[in-house]
Image (cartoon, rainbow, N blue to C red):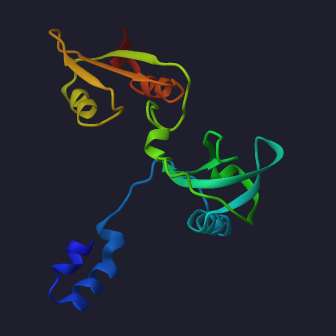
Amino acid sequence: WLDLVGGIRDKPYVLHHLLKNIDRMLYVVPDAPKDYSGREEDLRLILRALFHRRRVRFQYKAGPKVHEVSPLTLVMYRSALYLVALYRAESRPYLFAIDRVSNLELTKKRFEYPPDFNPEGLFEGAFGIFQGTEEHEVDLVFADKPWLHRYLSERCWHPTQSFEERDDGTLRMRFTVSSMVEVEPWIRSFGEDVQRL
């Protein structure tokens, strides 16, 4: 952004154009988005807690228990928002779906943001955001359809993925995940065009 702005000669004109039209120049087509209308105050409080390192208290739809956590990261995944948070400094991070949070309040308690926390590492090994404790080897063969081969090989589905064009025209795909929760529906979405090995 700084390089872009630094290279603009007529800043008032160009920046006016960018600010006026940026929402149409860069656009996201959401994937079955969740509706957060009416949740603006909760999102404001979560952002405030994140930026000011304040703990939050809330109830979660899984039960009546009141959770008090230190928020670390607000994650958007498949057009849904999730909060990564710690109960205690030494505990493991937990994931909370924002639409399941209720009675959210900001506390006066501050916390130290963990210097070694990295959200990218939190989801390492997952096929999306759901984590598991075991390794699962996934070995698939996709039908001899060039459009399908392009669709699969042009995307990074998982960091461990590998592809092999087979002599019969099919495409073999392999990867290793920590949970099959999101892999199973993904495999089923290809119908008869995929087989497990």
Residue 141 is situated, as x and y percent measured from the top left of the image, at 30, 15
Residue 113 is situated, as x and y percent measured from the top left of the image, at 57, 56
Residue 15 is situated, as x and y percent measured from the top left of the image, at 27, 84
**Which residue is nearer to you in this view: 167 or 59?**
59
Q: Quadrant of residue 104?
A: bottom right
Q: Residue at x 14, y 87 (%)?
A: 9
Q: Quadrant of residue 174?
A: top left
Q: Is residue 99 left or right of residue 189?
A: right
**Which residue is nearer to you in this view: 157 or 83?**
83
Q: Is residue 23 left or right of residue 108?
A: left
- Residue 47 drawn above or below residue 120: below
Q: Residue at x 66, y 67 (%)?
A: 45
- Residue 165 drawn above or below residue 29: above
Q: Which quadrant of the figure contains the C terminus?
A: top left
Residue extending farthest to the right is 64
Q: Is residue 94 left or right of residue 163?
A: right
Q: Residue at x 17, y 89 (%)?
A: 10
Residue 129 is situated, as x and y percent measured from the top left of the image, at 51, 38
Q: Residue at x 24, y 31 (%)?
A: 153
Q: Quadrant of residue 18?
A: bottom left
Q: Is residue 35 left or right of residue 26?
A: right
Q: Which quadrant of the figure contains the N terminus?
A: bottom left
